[in-house]
Image (cartoon, grey):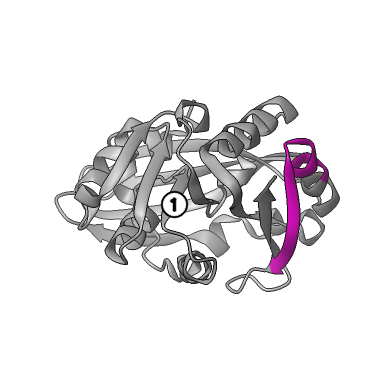
Amino acid sequence: MPDALYADPRLAPLHDPLDPDRSDLDPYLAMAEEFGARRVLDVGCGTGTFACLLAEHGFDVIGVEPAAASLDVARAKPFADRVRWLHGDATVVPALSADLATMTANVAQVFLTDEEWHATLRAVHTALRPGGRLVFETRDPAVRAWTGWTRERTSTEADVPGVGTVRAWCEVLGVAEPLVSFRWTYVFDADGTTLTSDSTLRFRTREEVERSLQAAGYRVAEVRDAPDRPGRELVFVAVRE
């Protein structure tokens, strides 16, 4: 099940206002252009920011997302009418002969079991054309990013149209490596309502990711450093064989 942040109709519209800087998507757009892609599959497209950005630049885009509330937000954005939206996980995606598949932000880490991760990789493999690429990022577990997920370091707020001021912060609930669980708390100042969204991410090592890609029928072409989190995140470029 998707986390409440993405699936709750009250929380999904807060995602973009509380995280307005999406410069982390620029390298993905650049790679789509670098690889000469024409059709792009955005797995776990969330509120559709990247899918709509791709559509704006003339790509043929398919966005797949299991949280219906997030898709509702996505469909209201500029250029959304140029995107084919699919409700579900990657396993609902048909054979598309896509040139490129992407998983931005934390999408690659939401698959907690080896079975879920392998099923996703295989589903994307089916959706890609031979020689097509899968590009995604994952945080390096050695950096232990979660040590900074405290209320003091993550507190943010935004004035959300039609809602008012919303304050939010993150706190870690538990660490049992490779799994890290955490909670986002949202306070609506207009009426004092407080909502929470609990999440768990899996932190795989570079070696684990490379083995899983090879087992799913990919060749790891390269591993890049994430421009927005240098030294903390790895960007995998895998080729469908």
Dividing the image into 4 quarters, which one contains the C terminus? top right
Seen from the viewer's position, the closer of residues 8 and 140 is 140
The residue located at (47%, 60%) in the rendering is: 37
Residue 65 belongs to the span the image colors magenta: no
Left or right: where 224 falls relative to 215: left
Image coordinates for residue 221, horizontal then vertical, percent = 73, 60
Specify whether 158 is left or right of 115.
Answer: left
Residue found 60% across the figure and 33% down from its top? 120
- Residue furthest out toward the left: 162
* Residue 228 location (% of width, % of height): 57, 72
List the residue tagged with mark 1: 40
User: Element under label 1?
Assistant: strand
Q: Residue furthest front?
A: 130
- In the image, residue 221 lies in the stretch drawn in magenta: yes
Say if 64 sits above or below 150 in the image.
above
Residue 24 is situated, as x and y percent measured from the top left of the image, at 50, 67
Mark 1 surroundings within 10 Å by alpha-carbon count, few (fewer than 14), some (14 through 19), many (20 or more)? many
194 or 37: nearer the eye? 37
Q: Is residue 178 visible?
A: no
Q: Position of residue 100 (x, y in %)?
A: 52, 53
Count of labels in the image? 1
The amino acid sitting under disc 1 is: Val
In the displayed structure, does residue 181 sit left or right of residue 166?
Answer: right
Q: What residue appears at the point 41 percent right and 37 percent down from the top-left corner?
A: 65
Is residue 49 visible in the rendered image? The answer is: yes
**Left or right of 60 in this view: 236:** right
Which sits in the foreground, 32 or 76?
A: 32
User: In the rendered structure, which segment of residues is drawn in magenta?
Assistant: 211-224
